[in-house]
Image (cartoon, helix red, strand yellow):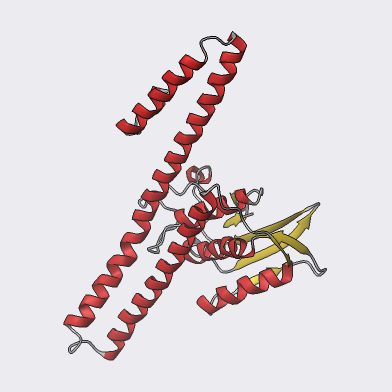
Amino acid sequence: IIGIMTDIGTEELAHMEMIAAIVHQLTRNLTPEQRKYVIGKQYEAEKADIERERMRANLLRAVSHDLRTPLTTIYSASSTLRSKKKILTEEQQDIMLKNIEEDSEWLIRMVENLLSVTRINNEQIQILKTPVILDELVDSVMTKFLTRYPVEKVTLDIPEEVVGVSVDTILIEQVLMNLLENAVFHAENRTYILFRVFVAEDKVVFEIADDGCGIREEKLKHIFEGNFDSSTDTADTKKRSAGIGLSVCATIIKAHNGEIRAENRENGGALFR
């Protein structure tokens, strides 16, 4: 176990060693089978703690990467507007103000994502599932998306019949918004975005696809872990990383006892399901 804990601090390691000593004292009089069961449970608990710490570390790295550029842009633009306002043209000022506005909006959504992860990871707080009509859910998502991105065109493919689903509406809308925005920011050379919803047996399936550059194969296995390297992000020609948003999506869907997957399409582009 110690071999696995190379990144854990001294206090945490001392704490785990103390627990191990206590467990050893408590298990001295147990049968070999009982001792094996107790130690196995202890190992599973410690392994879960290590995994949570690893996920927190990945999240912090991704947050640091994602926040740096928009904050720098906001600071630079606002400083320039204050110090050189008299020599800047009205058009130049409008461009800087627009950049400040866009980056501020993105930072707000980043905070929303982080708050959602914190909320779900708090074991005392449960997601709030309520019945909702599928059409209403999709309509709400598209209204918000087109308000933010009025020039984007999204092709909708949804069931004609009335379908009800029980979900935490706010969180599922957040997942769908994150996936749509991911296509906007990272699907380089795309010509369309397809938003498809259908029912498969007792499950509702959401698919968001594009015909862009796709996802590098080495990223597919870890795409929902929130540990993207800025030097190798898929089609990251924009300043925003997909890491946080996709990590949040995975956390929310897991909390709903669902599954989320990503793949490359045969004719090009990416598909998130």
- Judge whether 29 appears above or below 242 on screen: above
Count every numbered label the image shows and give the total: 0
Residue located 51% across and 62% down the image:
182
- Front-lying residue, 139 or 114: 114
Quarter of the rendering occupied by the C terminus: bottom right
Residue 76 x/y as whole percent: 24, 72
Q: Does the image show residue 261? A: no
Figure check: 154 above or below 17: below
Residue 127, quarter of picture: bottom right
- Residue 150 coordinates in the image, percent (x, y): 53, 79
Q: Could one spot residue 16 in this view of the protein?
A: yes
Q: Quadrant of residue 53?
A: top left
Residue at x 48% of width, y 30% of height: 46
Please say if 204 is above or below 11: below
* Image quarter in which the N terminus is found: top left
166 w.r.t. 39: above or below: below
Q: Residue at x 30, y 31 (%)?
A: 10
Which residue lies at the image location 37% right of the left edge and 29% below the top edge? 15
Q: Quadrant of residue 210?
A: bottom right
Is 36 placed left or right of 64 in the picture?
right
Q: Residue 3 at x, y = what percent?
A: 39, 23
Locate residue 92 relative to residue 161 in the image: left or right.
Answer: left
